[in-house]
Image (cartoon, grey):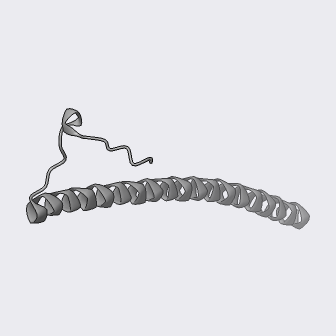
Amino acid sequence: MINLIILSFITISAFTVIYVKHKNRLINIDIERSEKKLSNELNEHKRLLDIKAQLIDKKLTDSNIKRILGMEIPDKNKIIYIDLVE
């Protein structure tokens, strides 16, 4: 009778270890997916911030050029091209 109880405990312990390892593996897979998604979203955020900085810089540069120098880009039909080949 005691042997049956010991065998039951060993069997239950073995199945518990297998179940815990399986759950641990599933949790690790979910963590990896979440980290990959977070990494992709961070990269997208950095890319958008870079684009924003470039647009702001271009806007500030253009507005400063127009304000300081009083210059504007002429229309295409008002541009004169000079041939410098001798």
Residue depicted at 10% across the width and 66% down the height: 68
Query: In the rendering, at what x and y percent does residue 46 appear?
Result: 41, 60
Quick one: 49 or 76, which is closer to the camera? Answer: 76
Quick one: 71 or 62, which is closer to the camera? Answer: 71
Number of disc labels: 0
Residue 53, by quadrant, is: bottom left
Query: In the rendering, at what x and y percent does residue 59 appear?
Result: 21, 56
Residue 76, by quadrant, is: top left
Residue 58 vertical placement versus 6 (above, below): above
Residue depicted at 17% across the width and 43% down the height: 74
Query: In the rendering, at what x and y percent does residue 7 appear?
Result: 87, 62
In the rendered view of the protein, which quadrant contains the N terminus? bottom right
- Name, please, the residue furthest toward the right: 3
Q: Relative to 60, is 43 on the left or the right? A: right
- Name, please, the residue furthest toward the front: 86
Query: In the rendering, at what x and y percent does residue 47 appear?
Result: 41, 56
Residue depicted at 47% across the width and 57% down the height: 43
Quick one: 32 or 82, which is closer to the camera? Answer: 82
Residue 19, by quadrant, is: bottom right
Quick one: 18 or 42, which is closer to the camera? Answer: 42
Residue 74 vertical placement versus 57 (above, below): above
Residue depicted at 72% across the width and 60% down the height: 21
